[in-house]
Image: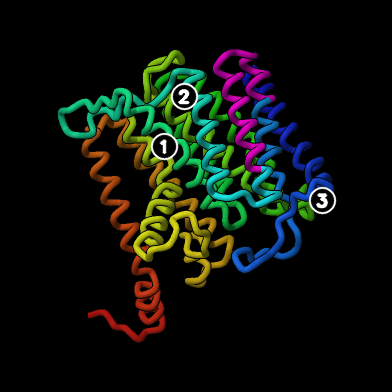
Amino acid sequence: MMLYAFSITFCISLIAVMILHRLAKPLGLLDVPCTRKAHEGHVPLVGGMAVFIAASIGLLFYFGPSKLLNLYIISCSLMVFIGVLDDKYDLSVRSRLIGQFLVSSILIFGLDTYIFSLGNVFYFLNFELGTFGIVLTYLAVIGAINAFNMVDGIDGLLGSLSIVSFSGVAILAYNSTSNIMLIYSTILIVSILPYLMANLSIPPFKNRKVFMGDAGSMFIGLAVVWLVVFGTQHTFVGSPSFRPVTALYLIALPLMDMVAIMFRRIKKKQSPFKPDRNHMHHICMRAGFSGKQSLCLLSVLAAAIMGLGVFLELMLVPEWVSLFIFIILFAFYNYFISHVWRIVKYIRKYSQGEIKVG
């Protein structure tokens, strides 16, 4: 049954990418190069719709209709619809945030599920949030949606980082024998693979390149954060599969990039939502890496941080220690990003022999 679900999901995603590639032009869902977008030609923004369609059918095939799955698909459908409108009409920040707030409300109040505990992140204190947990859940959902939206800047990056996150959830779900979480995350991984092939122009998609679009990045962000919420809290689905602090490691790179860049924008007295070309992938490419090199570098970094988080979880390292390690990682990341050009200049001088050691 499990293999059938995975096979059906993969095939539907493959077919959906091919069909939607043809429909992109009539629908007006094409990404046009501009000052912030350096790709060549008009590229269809339909990858996210293909992934959503395949994942929804795969989940329904395996689990069948249920309150959890029905509300999940309804919420994701609304998120994809808002994303499609954004891809076509370039919605305002306010409109997107209102849509994300409404989607979050469906899942929070429809399933009565939210972040009510952060675990023992303060040494001996089990940090219970009470009603404030609802507010934090809104912030977490909207934050994750926008974090994954921000990293969708070079070919393959969003797909690779989302697979890293879903893989971390799957590993931890398998360790805790949570079948629902394991199947959910694996079906999402399988649904992304055909898109990733098309995005990277891998046969049979040699001349059928597609992008996720905002529809896809918002859907992925929503899917990741709700797997994390269900994975870390006591819900009707079951006991937690991992501790809340471990969730930070599963989405580390998108989260750190979003927080660091929004902090820099606020520091410069700019809108934190103002788009620019100062994300981690842009910096990698301006530092001299190619698109594929940047993809490999960032994917390996994300996988390494995720692996560290999984290791700390499996070894039952105290939660406050895991949090402290993550804060150190973020501090290093933020320092590197803030001083990246000074560091790159030093590395170039060292590689050219202008700086001698010893």
Q: Quadrant of residue 159?
A: top right
Task: Identify the magenta region.
Answer: 57-83
Q: What residue type is disc 1 on?
A: Ala
Q: Residues within 10 Å of mark 2 (few under 14, many from 20)?
A: some
- Percent across and percent down for residue 40 are 72, 65
Q: For the stretch drawn in magenta, what is the main secondary structure? A: helix
Say which residue appears at 72% left-offset and 26% top-offset: 8
- Percent across and percent down for residue 27 are 80, 46
Q: What residue type is disc 2 on?
A: Ile
How far separated are the C-alphas under marks 1 and 2?
Answer: 12 Å
Determine whether label 3 and label 2 are within 8 Å by CB.
no
Labelled disc at residue 108: 2
Q: Secondary structure at mark 2?
A: helix
277 sits to left or right of 346: right
Say which residue appears at 22% left-offset and 80% top-offset: 358
Residue 84, compared with residue 131, is above or below; it is below
